[in-house]
């Protein structure tokens, strides 16, 4: 959901499933509640504040990564305005810069990508796995039917690899579980 969404739009799934960094919602509503646009935007602003207390965050909204260079633990990222978005890998060569974008998807939903890929990054395992990636934009333009089959095959492959190298609690605490609604 973005700023350009109409104010009457609500989430299509219960609000606790939409978060970042496993940060709890502060709405005080039943967990089946479908949050409004403003409630979602407020929650993500809160998430950003909490995450900024944990790690350094540099915000480049409306920009695309042009390149990243890692030297001695320091990452220099070059960005440009998003007039078009060329391919950008989900992880930089050195493994210090992660990108959740539709040109290099590793799982079926950006929420899954953000959750699982961040765990792999923080555990130092993101470069160890032979994950498949898919250019969602290009594939959908070529064949929507093939896209769906490829997407779920990709997700099954990548999740099976992830399940062998992350602690079980990463899966059990994921929160994207319909049984928890």
Image (cartoon, rainbow, N blue to C red):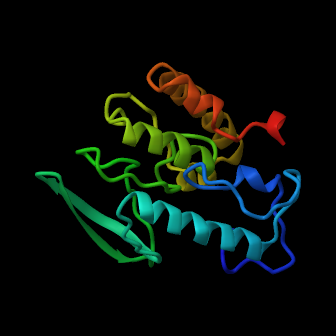
Residue at 38 percent across and 42 percent down: it is: 121
Q: Is residue 160 visible?
A: yes
Would residue 63 appear left or right of 15 to someone viewing this image? left
Q: Quadrant of the C terminus?
A: top right
> In the image shown, does 117 or 53 lie closer to the viewer?
53
Labels in figure, total: 0
Quarter occupied by residue 122: top left
> In the image shown, does 121 or 173 lie closer to the viewer?
173
Q: Residue furthest left?
A: 72
Would residue 164 appear left or right of 176 to someone viewing this image? left
Q: Position of residue 107 (x, y in %)?
A: 57, 40
> In the image shown, does 53 or 68 lie closer to the viewer?
53
Q: Is residue 74 above or below residue 151?
A: below
Q: Is residue 165 above or below residue 148?
A: above
Q: Position of residue 12 (x, y in %)?
A: 83, 57
Q: Is residue 61 above or below residue 23?
A: below
Q: Residue furthest top?
A: 164
Q: Position of residue 146 (x, y in %)?
A: 66, 39
Would residue 71 appear left or right of 98 to someone viewing this image? left
Q: Is residue 153 visible?
A: no
Q: Position of residue 8 (x, y in %)?
A: 87, 77
Quarter occupied by residue 67: bottom left
Would residue 86 appear left or right of 19 to someone viewing this image? left
Residue at 39 percent across and 69 percent down: it is: 64
Q: Quadrant of the N terminus?
A: bottom right
């Amino acid at each position: 959901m973005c700023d350009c969404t109409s104010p009457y739009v609500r989430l299509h799934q219960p609000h606790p499933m939409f978060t970042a960094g496993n940060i709890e919602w502060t709405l005080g509503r039943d967990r089946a509640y479908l949050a409004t646009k403003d409630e979602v935007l407020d929650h993500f602003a809160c998430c950003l504040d909490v995450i900024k207390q944990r790690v350094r965050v540099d915000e480049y909204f409306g920009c695309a990564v042009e390149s990243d260079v890692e030297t001695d633990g320091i990452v220099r990222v070059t960005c440009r305005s998003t007039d078009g978005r060329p391919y950008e890998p989900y992880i930089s060569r050195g493994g210090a810069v992660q990108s959740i974008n539709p040109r290099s998807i590793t799982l079926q939903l950006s929420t899954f990508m953000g959750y699982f890929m961040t765990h792999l990054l923080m555990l130092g395992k993101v470069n160890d796995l032979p994950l498949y990636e898919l250019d969602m934009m290009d594939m959908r333009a070529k064949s929507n039917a093939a896209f769906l089959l490829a997407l779920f095959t990709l997700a099954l492959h990548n999740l099976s690899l992830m399940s062998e190298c992350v602690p079980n609690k990463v899966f059990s605490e994921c929160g994207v579980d319909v049984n928890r609604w």
